[in-house]
Image (cartoon, helix red, strand yellow):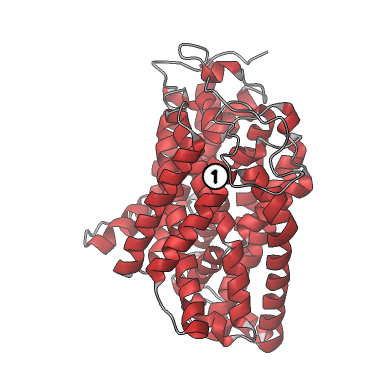
Amino acid sequence: MASTDMPTSLPGEKRAFRLQPPPSWGIEPVPQRLRILGFLDQTALWSSLGFSLLLIVAGSLLVVLYNFSLAQALIAILIGGVIGNLLLGLAAVVGADLGVPSMVALRAPLGIRGSYLATALNVLQNIGWATFEIVIMALAADQISQKLLGFSNAVLWVVVFAVICTFFAVGGPLVLVRQWIEKFAIWLVLATTVYLTWYLLSHYDIGALLAIESSSGQFWLGVDLVVALPISWFPLVSDYSRFSREARSAFWGTAIGYFLANVWFFALGVLFVLALGTNDVLAAFPTLAAGWLVLLILLVDETDEGFANIYSTAVSLQNYFPQARQMQLSLLVGIVSALFAGLIITSSVPLLEYESFLLLIGSFFVPLLGVVAADYFLHQRRRYDRDALYQSGGRYWFSGGFNWPAIGAWALGTVLYWLLTDLPQRTLAPLGLGLPSAAAALPTLSQFGGTIPSFLLALALYALMGRARTPVAQ
């Protein structure tokens, strides 16, 4: 197994975090004495990760791209929030049971080498998320500096926020949760969110907005979009739930914490577009009373999302390179994300492209979670052989390191998601490559979007094929 440097006491728990190389747990199981996060810790962490400017942007897409009414959008948000966060909570249970990061836990259903496929996708999506986070923070900070200081340089803000997020990633999750989120960030952003909600509800006729009907026929695609946000955290959630005291607190803290923020901020995004009559939600903040202060506080809290993506990319890369040090990997990921963010800023890539990115994430990770659910909860009854997760040639080696039935069920679930959401058409059409509608091949199922059918297909397929796999660990 990978070597680790275990601290004799929890870093930052009794004294302030210092500028020194922090201890790294690598990809080995977290020892029981350091599994200290309870229900409130997990709820605070996942609420803070959900209180995000990017979720407001994602909520606005339900109106801007899908032409949802307020009522239709709110129903889609609630349904998607329940589905996505229950699944996210189940994924958190795996990390809490085993004390290992997400990519290591995937060695059991996919095979040790098979987990590298998921790792590659997770690294790509995390770098994409880190890039989006840095871009949104840089754009918001640039608006503030233009208004208050008469200064504009979005690329400089890219560098500033990349440095801040990377610094948090080097510190690790225990420092972030106990020293930053619980003491400062969650209270500031919660007060700001309450104020923002009160302002919109008291200054605009919400009843009139609710009375507006919509002819949009993309309801379940909207649900897929909402589900994509919590599901995007599925490959990361065990990186944090492994520090939990017990599985129950990890499940409920994760599911409730992210659900509240997920639903709340999606709804705010919809309200911004409908009430203020704008497609640019960032530009809408200055029109509100104290809008600059609200934007500034949300901007400060946004750094924990950037941290999570950089930190988990480093942890995921250790699934390939267990001897690599987390600190160096975090620095590398921070630099790469900053370069991509700078490229997006200078190229003026529209944030509407964010929709295809979200659906692409859902297409891979929703069916993968179906395979994990079938394997861990149905076949293995929450009993994996933790030592074997690190053993080449052991029980999770399968056929040359790959568990092909699981990978096959995952692949078929992904293809079904693509068909039901017309994802190839959405992805390739901007490149001028026209394709016939893939959803036309499955008109009945397409009415339910991609999330539920692809999850159930992958779960059912592996529930049947997995019966022939290795016996349950004792």
Q: Position of residue 324 (x, y in %)?
A: 45, 30
| Quadrant housing residue 204 | bottom right
SS state under label 1:
helix
In the foreground, 233 or 364: 233
Is residue 67 shown to the viewer in this render? no
Q: Residues within 10 Å of mark 1 (few under 14, many from 20)?
A: many
In the foreground, 100 or 141: 141
| Quadrant housing residue 446 | bottom left
Q: Position of residue 166 (x, y in %)?
A: 50, 51
Q: What kind of residue is marked 1?
A: Val
Query: On the rendered structure, is 93 left or right of 138?
Result: right
In the foreground, 156 or 427: 156
- Judge whether 104 appears above or below 69 on screen: above
Residue drawn at (51%, 15%) of the image: 391
Residue drawn at (61%, 62%) of the image: 301
Q: In the picture, which quadrant includes the C terminus?
A: top right
Is residue 449 shown to the viewer in this render? yes
Residue drawn at (44%, 50%) of the image: 334
Query: On the rendered structure, is 405 left or right of 455?
Result: left
| Quadrant housing residue 188 | bottom right
- Judge whether 24 appears above or below 354 on screen: above
Q: Which residue is mark 1?
A: 170
Q: Position of residue 52 (x, y in %)?
A: 58, 63
Residue drawn at (57%, 78%) of the image: 272
Q: Position of residue 27 (x, y in %)?
A: 55, 29
